[in-house]
Image (spheres, coloured by chain):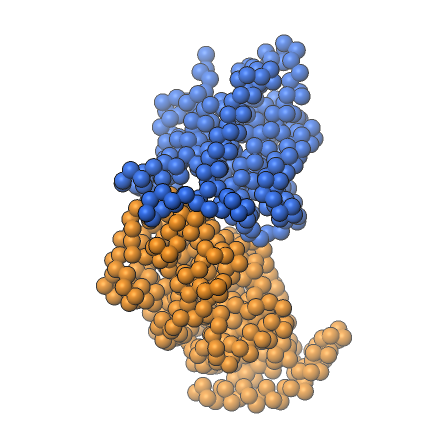
Amino acid sequence: MTNDKSVSKFAISRRGLLAASAAGATGLALGFPSPALSQGAPLKVGLMLPSSGTFAKLGQFIDNGFSLYVEQKGGMLGGRPVEFIRLDDESKPETATDNMNRLVGRDKVDFVVGTVHSGVAMAMVKVARDTGVPLIIPNAGADEATGPLCAPNIFRTSFSNWQVSEPMGKVMHYVGHRNVVSITWRYAAGIQMAKGFAEGFTKAGGTVVEELTLPFPEVEFQAMITRIAQLKPDAVFAFFAGGGAVKFVTDYAAAGLQGKIPLYGTGFLTDGTLPAQGAAAEGIRTTLHYADDLNNPANVAFLEAFKKKTGQVGDIYAVQGFDAAALLDVGLTATKGDSAARDAMFAVMGSAKLDSPRGPLAFSAAHNPIQDIYLREVRQGKNTLVSVASKGVADPARGCKMT
Amino acid sequence: MDIATFAIQLLNAVQYGLVLFLVASGLTLVFGILGVINLAHGAFYMLGAYFAWWFTLATGNLFIGIVAAFVVSFLLGLLLESLFIKRLYGRDHLSQVLLSFGLILVLDKLRQIVFGRDVYSVPLPEWLSGSIQLTDLQSYPHYRVALIGFCLLVAAAIFFVINRTRIGMIVRAGAENRDMTRALGIPFDRVNRLVFAVGIALAALAGAVIAPVSTVFPGMGDSMLILSFVVVVLGGVGSVPGAAIGALLIGLIDTFGKVFLPEFAGVLIYLLMALVLLWRPTGIMGKREI
């Protein structure tokens, strides 16, 4: 099936559903059992996201993005009403397998959407491979999920660690940096990002002078920052996220290096952290598959709707959640809401072309996004778009047998 | 490594060591004098940081925040000692470990309920947020300089109390021989209560003063607990000067280890501990077994 067909089918079913959706929404509001008003039993969607811990906010935004899309479709995906089963994964890899088994075994969900933390996502990927339950990853960037562990039933609507870091290597060489130091936490995501960056940078002709690492999630950066000042590189590439990103950026500025040795990174260094970082983040350049001020119609409409629903400004995490729902919708629309027709659904989802708020979004054979990677700069507390760092970036999906 | 860089790294090491000392001094007092293994020591370090964040936010003044964190933790310490800890004196280490581990879980859950699970940052007052230019490239934040000064002051106060006051004399006597001190009719119960409360208040104080340069986050006490036990064992159980030496050693090894041997940075301090214990099984300033 071509994509044009899937889009047109999608439009027809949507029109047909307008009246029903209004009735459905009223039914839900009044507390009627929804099956009575809808076509068939509700779809069970398991949202396994962190609602506590360091990543709580990210989980909440993904959830809101996903719900926003479902609400826009009148509470339905592919013409069937949706029932959510929410589970807090606490970003704990050690309980991830049990949690995932609970959703699949006890709650019998039709789909699982999750999660933020790569370690948790890896456990979810393993259960998804064993049970065949369709899994959509709305954030975690572990290269393996669409690499050696790729599977027909696993999709990702976010990024791979390689995908967002490799283009930065080219960018930093292009602007004239030749000797660069990288710094990150010594754990899966950090190592993959530093490797992806080094690949792009050395291929372009630059040299990574030193790769600094410290144990996750240690935040005692002083010794490392002094080391950077001693090495005097042309620039620094950093990957940190959340509280660690806040502290690294403020320590870097407090040590007097801001503006003297330019700081670069992947978007996580400055995404969702700018209020806490303040002026210390000004001028930092990052690569990501999103920027706050993308001016395409889909993004403008998305940000407006998100603001209306939650009162908050939408970000990349909300977009990734939104797109996860959109991707499911495309697949289910093609099978007329039949979630058991998995092969047909996966085929349509794999060739889907979404008009995402981030820009055009397609999927590789390994089910990882093919998307533009943007270069952004922090100006007046916003991640402002500078240029498209690399167009239509596809992860090489090393080790994936589906490619 | 040039002289300036070396000096800055040395400053980093000393500052890290001094904060470690604040935490470990409380632990070594409780461990050495009460004979209680307090696994919840790290939890008080974390609580101190959260208290400081909360009070700073409420009053808009970092100093009120830090003092309030210290005072509240001290009162909490008095309460906990009279409710639970005093039942542990003389018991075997297993009951102590069980109770203090239980305390970790309870305190952590309370923290979740009261302060939530988010990561917070504590703002610095204007006059402390600048930095001193050291080389053409580097500067050193004012707050870190102030932190070094403050830790030295607290350390001096601890040494003064222990070496020059009557209460310090009792504390030293207790650390030397608990039973003999009690046999001499010294009001050891009240001193015990005070020592425990001061011990955990010192941990909370360390958490409070580090809060502005660190972020305040759940679980920040876990790594601190392990490190401060290393300091205590290294320096000798119950010895405050020992804790000072141990903390500074670990600050130095950790900082320079990260620079020169980054792959082994996590192992070096434990290697140091093993070597010291081979040389002196009771720690650097520990009591000799007779």
What is the x, y in percent for residue A254?
A: 43, 48
Q: Which residue is at a point 27% across and 53% down the rendered structure image? A: A209
Residue A345 placement (x, y as % from top left) = 49, 79
Taking the image as shown, residue A111 lies to the left or right of residue B252, namely right
B263 vs A302, nearest the viewer: A302
| Residue B172 sits in quarter | top right
Question: Which is more toward the observer, A213 or A86?
Answer: A213
Q: Would residue B6 appear left or right of A279 to someone viewing this image?
A: left
Question: Could you say where residue A259 lies in the image, as x and y percent from the top left?
Answer: 37, 56
Q: Quadrant of the C terminus of chain A?
A: bottom left
Judge left or right: residue B251 versus residue A124: left
Which quarter of the picture shows residue B99? top right
Q: Quadrant of the N terminus of chain A?
A: bottom left
Q: Can residue A372 be seen in the rendering of this structure?
A: yes
Residue B1's place in the image compared with A79, above or below, is above
Q: Position of residue B58 (x, y in %)?
A: 65, 47
Res A76 seen here: no
Name the residue at 62% across, 29% down: B197
> What residue sits 41% from the left and 51% below the top?
A252
Name chain B's colour: blue
Q: Quick one: which residue is furthest to the top in this view?
A: B184
Judge by depth and name the residue closer to the eye, A171 or B80. Answer: A171
Residue placed farthest to the left in the image?
A205
Instruction: Please identify which colour was used for chain A in the image.
Output: orange
> From the viewer's perspective, is A191 left or right of A54?
left
